[in-house]
Amino acid sequence: MSENKIGSWLHESVGQTVKVQMISGDFVEGEMVCVDSQLNLVIKRGSTSESKETFVKGSSIRYIHNI
């Protein structure tokens, strides 16, 4: 898949629930808030009243699953 298609898919996924698998094997699940040109993500985790935003560095991502 070309870089353009990956970038388009990620931008279309903003606002959707995703599960991100890290190179370390850990997972981060939540609503994707934003993505930048380096594929860095911000994920909102938790309920609306107690949500926390998590920054995920693009170089540490193994796979992103749409849920």
Image (tube, rainbow, N blue to C red):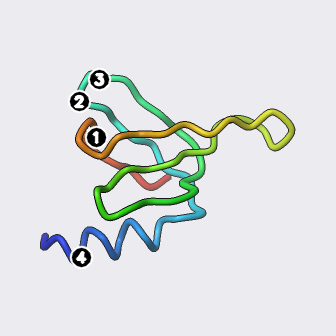
In the picture, measured across the screen, residue 45 lies left or right of residue 35, that is: right
Label 4 to label 2, Cα distance in Å? 22 Å
Q: Position of residue 8 (x, y in %)?
A: 34, 76
Q: Quadrant of the N terminus?
A: bottom left
Q: Amino acid at mark 4?
A: Lys
Label placed on residue 61: 1
Label 4 sits on a secondary structure element that is helix
10 Å neighbourhood of mark 4: few (<14), some, or many (≥20)? few
The residue tagged with tag 2: helix, strand or loop?
A: loop
Residue 59, position as x, y percentages in the image: 23, 41
Q: Which residue is mark 3?
A: 25
Residue 49 lies left or right of residue 58; in this view the side is right
Q: Are the residues tagged 2 and 1 within 8 Å (C-beta)?
A: yes
Cα–Cα gap, marks 4 and 1: 17 Å
Pointer 4 residue: 5
Q: Are marks 4 and 1 in contact (CB under 8 Å)?
A: no
Q: Residue at x 59, y 51 (%)?
A: 31
Instruction: State whether residue 47 is above or below residue 39.
Output: above
Q: Which callout, 4 or 2, points at the residue further toward the start of the chain?
A: 4
Callout 3 environment at 10 Å: few (<14), some (14 to 19), or many (20+)?
few
